[in-house]
Amino acid sequence: MATKANTSVRFRIRVFRGKEITFGPGKAELLTHLARTGSLNQAAKRMNMSYMKAWSMVKLMNQSYKQPLVKAERGGSGGGGAELTDFGRRLLSLYAEMEKESLSAVGKPWKEIQKMLK
Amino acid sequence: MATKANTSVRFRIRVFRGKEITFGPGKAELLTHLARTGSLNQAAKRMNMSYMKAWSMVKLMNQSYKQPLVKAERGGSGGGGAELTDFGRRLLSLYAEMEKESLSAVGKPWKEIQKMLK
DNA sequence: TTCCGTTATATTATTAAAAATATAATGCAT
DNA sequence: ATGCATTATATTTTTAATAATATAACGGAA
């Protein structure tokens, strides 16, 4: 038994500005879906999130950074749509890097803890 | 302006066993206070946590690991008390190590993100 | 034998977070 | 004009997390 099937360490890395969470795992997932679908509505649906919550997240992000992460348009042929800006793509990839780095940094103590779990 | 006063990354490292969080920042803080005070009641008060919640955390921890992290006694001269076991002290220090390692691992991308924040 | 401060536990109440619902606005296409 | 799929926003409802309250048990000390 090298690893216990049931056990895991999970990270929540959150970027704060004052009291507000301007980036975290939920927002990262939302932006990832948004990049694929081109629609905030579709992105929200894919992660079983209400459109309203998704929209309020985007609003907060857009006003927290020097440049908007998401550009949205309404009306038009398909009803409208939303997409990531280059700025947004960059932030998303930096966040992914943080997740990857920290997860690998934690390997040794985590193995020890795993041994201590039932 | 080297760092923005207002901004921070925060980690929530959680140890899961199935759906249950068997260790995390709250439990770590509780055990730290417990080590100092020798009383679960006092430890809870120091972090403005209800005794009931503290106790249920201890209960979950004690039944999730191969050995108990906390040993409690009731009755007696001071009414009773609780203390960390060696096993508990070890887990607490491993957790602290995870926090420290991951924070330092994240330095580079975090600096970049900080620049992007308003 | 009664008092004390604690652990131990269940039940109820409060609060905060999330979800659901509703509605307006947009602009292209048919 | 009307329909369409979306963004944008406010309001209400529901749910889940947390806190509060209550009570029992324990065992030494005065």
Image (cartoon, coloured by chain):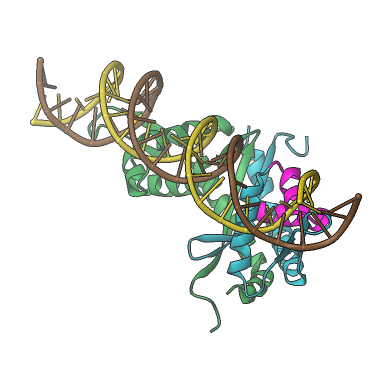
Chain colours: A green, B cyan, C yellow, D brown
Asked whether residue B56 is drawn in magenta, I would say: no
Q: Position of residue B75 (x, y in %)?
A: 75, 58
Asked whether residue B34 is drawn in magenta, I would say: yes
In which image quadrant can residue A67 be found?
A: top right
Q: Is B1 on the left-hand or right-hand side of A15?
A: right
Please state the total of marks drawn on the protein image: 0
Location of residue C17 with respect to B53 vertically, above or below: above
Q: Between residue C19 and residue B47, name the one nearer to us.
A: B47
Q: Between residue A88 and residue A17, name the one nearer to us.
A: A17
Majority secondary structure of magenta residues: helix
Question: Which residue occupies 63% across, 44% down?
Answer: B113
Q: Is B41 on the left-hand or right-hand side of A40?
A: right
In which image quadrant can residue B93 be found?
A: bottom right
In which image quadrant can residue A18 be found?
A: top right
For the question of whether residue A62 can be seen, the reply is no
Question: Which residue occupies 22% across, 32% down?
Answer: A77
Question: Which residue occupies 63% across, 39% down?
Answer: A16
Q: Position of residue A37 (x, y in %)?
A: 33, 46
Location of residue C26 with respect to A111 vertically, above or below: above
For the question of whether residue A105 can be seen, the reply is yes
Q: Is B64 on the left-hand or right-hand side of D6?
A: right
Q: Position of residue A71 (x, y in %)?
A: 42, 34
Query: Looking at the rendering, in which quadrant would you find the C terminus of chain A?
Result: bottom right
Q: Position of residue A25 (x, y in %)?
A: 51, 49
Question: Which residue occupies 70% across, 58% down?
Answer: B99
Location of residue A89 with respect to B80 vertically, above or below: above
Q: Between residue B46 and residue B109, name the one nearer to us.
A: B46
Residues in magenta?
Answer: B25-48
Residue with the most extreme bottom position = A1
